[in-house]
Image (tube, rainbow, N blue to C red):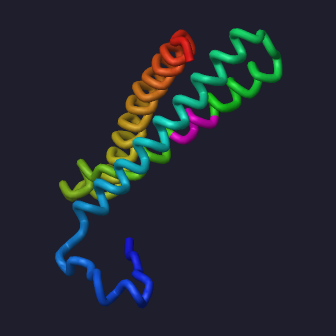
Amino acid sequence: MSYELKPGLKKFFSMIEEDRAWTAFVRDFAKGYFDIFRSLFVVGALKYISDKSESILLWVAYHTSLVVLLMLIPSYILSWYVHLFKHLGWGKTGEVLDLVFNVIIALVLWGFASRLVNIAVEVLAKSRM
């Protein structure tokens, strides 16, 4: 990720020329964390309002938002691919085992994350906003 300063500011500021991988990782992690946190809060607020008002429209909006949030989670989970068996020289068998292993990891993590999302939404909905 690269940031360009305006020409007038370049004489006062300069970027550090070292490897900025750590700062980029922290920035991307924080952005993803607050995106999910903000989404959890919105879904929790929708559930709270739909429960209080007993509105069908808000109930549909809440469930739609929950499904979209649960579809967002795999985009964070599936950004890594683990090569556990391929490097052992097993050829196609190693590639298939890697694929199966990664699918299992993704499903377990998605199930865990979706459970956490449901718990967080329930807690937010039960709190007094």
Q: Is 127 in front, or is 71? A: 127
- What is the magenta segment's predominant secondary structure? helix
Front residue of 75 and 33: 33
Please tell me in which quadrant of the rendered image residue 4 appears: bottom left
Q: Residue at x 21, y 77 (%)?
A: 16
Q: Which residues are magenta?
A: 68-72
User: Is residue 37 in view from this perspective?
Assistant: yes
Q: Is residue 62 left or right of residue 17?
A: right
Most extreme residue toward the right is: 56
Q: Quadrant of residue 17?
A: bottom left
Residue 96: horizontal and vertical position, in percent? 38, 48
Q: Percent from the top left, x then y, of residue 112?
A: 40, 25
Q: Position of residue 83 (x, y in %)?
A: 27, 52
10 on left or right of 69: left
Q: Residue at x 39, y 29 (%)?
A: 108
The quadrant of the image that shows the C terminus is top right
Q: Is residue 102 magenta?
A: no
